[in-house]
């Protein structure tokens, strides 16, 4: 049987453990898997682009488990009452190919993206950062805010979005976390000024320049999340040239990330090497750092294995016959007759 976790089940699991604990556990799982980087069979995601968005498949495996995620990115979906990003995923046994988990990953993707952002900042941002600018206050904003609050101790947010209602929503949702002070900014420049960490989470599929060189300050860390497909960026090219840039999986980020606007030889560091101690992260107090985040399949693998473990521990979700149950493996035709349901 396959354990099925839908959006309500995952919501219940998160409420049971608490969102700070879930984010911490997820960051720990991602770290553990990134430290096993050479053990994984990795590839860039397979993308099908259209004029209005993209649909992608994201696979990864080690010797024990295989995982994939189906995910879309359609910035215009909000006009139809649909999320910009929707996703589900599967975790399977490599030995048999049997799927052990079918799970929603829309909510989980926002959580794992936030956990990954905070994990990267732990590794390369200036220690002791307490002030963060949050540019783009849409569906992922609260998760980023809480991940940085939980994992790094960020306690002051300066927030900006071209849509005031998105900021209203963010402020309303974060009111439940009084230790996190939220200040509205009238512009990107105002939000960024004095921030030790800047997170950009915009959705528009365009070659945008959300952060420009004159906004940079010594020691600033930029968490660039929104530029995650070809033709979609958030940082001015000169920002990248002024910084030490870290990526998840370089072959994928070259095509989809902020560095798509740079020459092929532009230097970057894969984050797993920093986590493993194989390469330095921040090299000086005043160095500007960028995490060029596009999302990588290994992070979804980590999320799926955590969800599976929690679902089994708490008896959450339901077992479904996603594939034929035990019986004569050579008689698939039996499922076409009435006795198949008996």
Image (cartoon, rainbow, N blue to C red):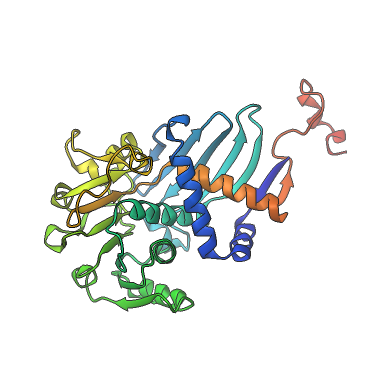
In depth, the one of 114 and 87 nearer the eye is 114
Instruction: Report the residue that reaches farthest toward the top.
Output: 330
Residue at 40 percent across and 38 percent down: it is 48
Q: Is any atom of residue 94 visible in this view?
A: yes
Q: Is residue 206 left or right of residue 46?
A: left
Q: Position of residue 311 (x, y in %)?
A: 66, 52
* The N terminus: image quadrant: top right
Image mark count: 0
Above or below for 296 versus 220: above
Q: Is residue 238 left or right of residue 75?
A: left
Q: Position of residue 91 (x, y in %)?
A: 59, 39
Above or below for 235 versus 249: below
Residue at 49 percent across and 57 percent down: it is 24
Q: Position of residue 152 (x, y in %)?
A: 38, 62
In depth, the one of 246 and 227 nearer the eye is 246
Above or below for 5 versus 134: above
Residue 100 picture quarter: top right
In depth, the one of 251 and 123 nearer the eye is 123
* The C terminus: image quadrant: top right
Residue at 18 percent across and 69 percent down: it is 189
In depth, the one of 104 and 62 nearer the eye is 62
Q: Position of residue 2 (x, y in %)?
A: 69, 41
Residue at 18 percent across and 33 percent down: it is 265
Q: Is any atom of residue 316 visible in this view?
A: no
């Amino acid at each position: 049987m396959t354990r099925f976790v839908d959006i309500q089940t995952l919501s219940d699991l998160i409420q049971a453990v608490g969102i700070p604990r879930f984010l911490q556990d997820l960051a720990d799982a991602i770290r553990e898997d990134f430290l096993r980087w050479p053990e994984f069979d990795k590839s860039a995601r397979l993308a099908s682009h259209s004029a209005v968005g993209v649909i992608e498949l994201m696979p990864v495996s080690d010797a024990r488990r295989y995982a994939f995620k189906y995910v879309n990115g359609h910035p215009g979906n909000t006009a139809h009452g649909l999320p910009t990003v929707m996703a589900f995923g599967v975790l399977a046994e490599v030995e048999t190919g049997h799927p052990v988990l079918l799970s929603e990953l829309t909510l989980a993707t926002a959580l794992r993206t936030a956990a990954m952002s905070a994990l990267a900042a732990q590794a390369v941002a200036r220690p002791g950062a307490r002030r963060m600018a949050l540019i783009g206050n849409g569906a992922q904003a609260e998760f980023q805010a809480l991940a940085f609050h939980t994992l790094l101790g960020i306690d002051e947010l300066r927030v900006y979005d071209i849509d005031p209602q998105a900021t209203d929503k963010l402020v309303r949702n974060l009111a439940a976390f009084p230790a996190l002070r939220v200040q509205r900014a009238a512009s990107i420049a105002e939000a960024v000024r004095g921030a030790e960490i800047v997170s950009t989470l915009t959705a528009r599929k365009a070659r945008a320049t959300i952060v420009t060189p004159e906004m940079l300050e010594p020691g600033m860390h930029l968490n660039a999340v929104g530029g995650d497909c070809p033709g979609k960026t958030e940082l001015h090219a000169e920002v990248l040239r002024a910084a030490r840039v870290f990526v998840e999986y370089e072959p994928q980020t070259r095509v989809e990330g902020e560095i798509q606007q740079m020459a092929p030889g532009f230097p970057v560091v894969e984050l797993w090497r920093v986590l493993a101690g194989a390469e330095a992260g921040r090299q000086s107090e005043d160095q500007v750092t960028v995490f060029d985040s596009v999302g990588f399949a290994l992070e979804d693998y980590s999320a799926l294995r955590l969800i599976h473990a929690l679902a089994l521990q708490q008896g959450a979700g339901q077992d479904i016959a996603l594939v034929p149950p035990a019986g004569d493996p050579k008689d698939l035709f039996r499922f076409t007759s009435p006795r198949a349901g008996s």
